Amino acid sequence: MEYHLHHTLGSVTYHPGSLPLPNFLEQLDIAPGNTAFALHFYHLMASQSPGSNIFFSPLSISASYAMLSLGARSHSKTQILEGLGFNLTEVSESDIHRGFQHLLHTLHLPDDRLEMHMGSTLFLSQDLLILPEFLNDSVAFYDSKLFLTNFHDPVGTTQLINDHIKEETQGKIVDLVSKLNTDIAMVLVNYIYFKALWEKPFQPSMTTTQDFHVDENTVVQVPMMLQDTAHHWYLNDRYLPCSVLRMDYKGNMTAFFILPNRGKMKQVEEALTPEMLTRWNRLLQKRKLELHFPKFSISGSYQLNEILPKMGFVDLFSRQVDLSGITKEKKLALSYRSFHKAILEVDEVGTQAAAATGIFTTFLSAWHNHRVLWFNRPFFVVIFSTNTQSILFLGKVVNPTKP
């Protein structure tokens, strides 16, 4: 399985005190805020497009805007950080940035069991005098890359940005940015390339074409993978009408797949909360399953400038935004376009995921006591980093034949 994400935070255009650098990484818990943001964003998308596939990387969005907050001031800074799910009476701004620093450092620790590249890039106008504090903190906390750019050449700049995105996502995302204006001063990009192997891969020879029930009136044909000799972490929820499957990967990542009972999608969707995710993870038990799971590829593309104002980012895309921590030369405002794109590919070989601890414990009953689990109707997916306790990807698969 592969995940590819590109997020353009937006371009910063002209309109006519920095944090101390830490000396060491600290284990700071920003996971609750990140989880709250992830589910808030998801529920907003689900309410706007109830019958569509959803897939995005909340961590990519959060990291991008947290980095932007380094240059925001007054109400603009508060709106960004609170919009990202942080209670500023409980966690300080400096702790948030150090928390992201530790999280990104942990995600980038060498691991030959998976491929993961996540980062941020600043394309800065060669005519703009950027404050050194912003540049230093962007690199120190978010490990961002910097490119001095001639925005007076929009064609060349567009090519430069798209080539960078293509390279960082291993060619999966191409030609995303177009029609840059000559008054742009800065473009911020965040990306993820994510590929790993299932801990228990499927056998391609056992994949067959089967029905997938999109809704009561729509049935599509999908390649359906099969495992009939493996144990998985599983829960048949007695209180919420759904089944929960955890599939582990080689590496420190894992995937949760939540399958609502027929006709119960909305009920389960409304119950998606941080507390419910914690509950499911606690109640999972090891069980032999005959597992039928679709092979598919989906993507999600979002105009964040239309979404984030509904999540509390009120000033960010208006002339009221205060980004004077980036430059003192001119007033800056984010342009009207802010992109986020993610791609999910699932096949027999794998995905990114986490190595399960205690994988051979808590078996339920004997081999003959097994269940048949068909993922042949819409379901949710949560890709989770176990060593950072962070949701990397979140989504809903409604129609696996629609990329």
Image (tube, helix red, strand yellow):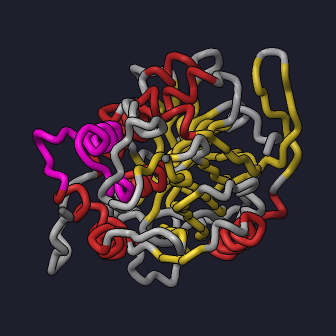
Q: How far across and down, in percent of the image, does residue 238 sit?
A: 41, 23
**In this image, 46 relative to 38: left or right?**
right
The N terminus sits in image quarter: bottom right
Q: Considering depth in this image, is 390 or 139 the residue closer to the camera?
A: 139
Can residue 363 be spotted in the picture? no
Task: State how many labels appear.
Answer: 0
Looking at this view, name the residue that lies furthest to the front: 16
* Quadrant position of residue 123: bottom right
Q: How far across and down, in percent of the image, does residue 362 sit?
A: 35, 52
Would you say residue 216 sits in the magenta stretch? no
Is 355 drawn above or below residue 215 in the view shown? below
Which residue is at 43% across, 67% downward? 355
Q: Which residues are magenta?
A: 66-93
Is 202 drawn above or below residue 311 in the view shown? below
Which residue is at 31% across, 74% downward? 132
**In this image, 56 relative to 347: left or right?**
left
Would you say residue 90 sits in the magenta stretch? yes
* Quadrant position of residue 386: bottom left
**In this image, 304 relative to 161: left or right?**
left
Q: How far across and down, in percent of the image, does residue 155 sit?
A: 77, 66
Which residue is at 65% across, 24% downward? 49
Q: Considering depth in this image, is 278 or 63 the residue closer to the camera?
A: 63
Which residue is at 51% across, 27% downward? 44
Q: How far across and down, in percent of the image, does residue 398 sit?
A: 70, 32
Is 293 drawn above or below residue 346 in the view shown? above
The C terminus sits in image quarter: top right
Can residue 284 be spotted in the picture? yes
Q: Considering depth in this image, is 170 or 164 the residue closer to the camera?
A: 164
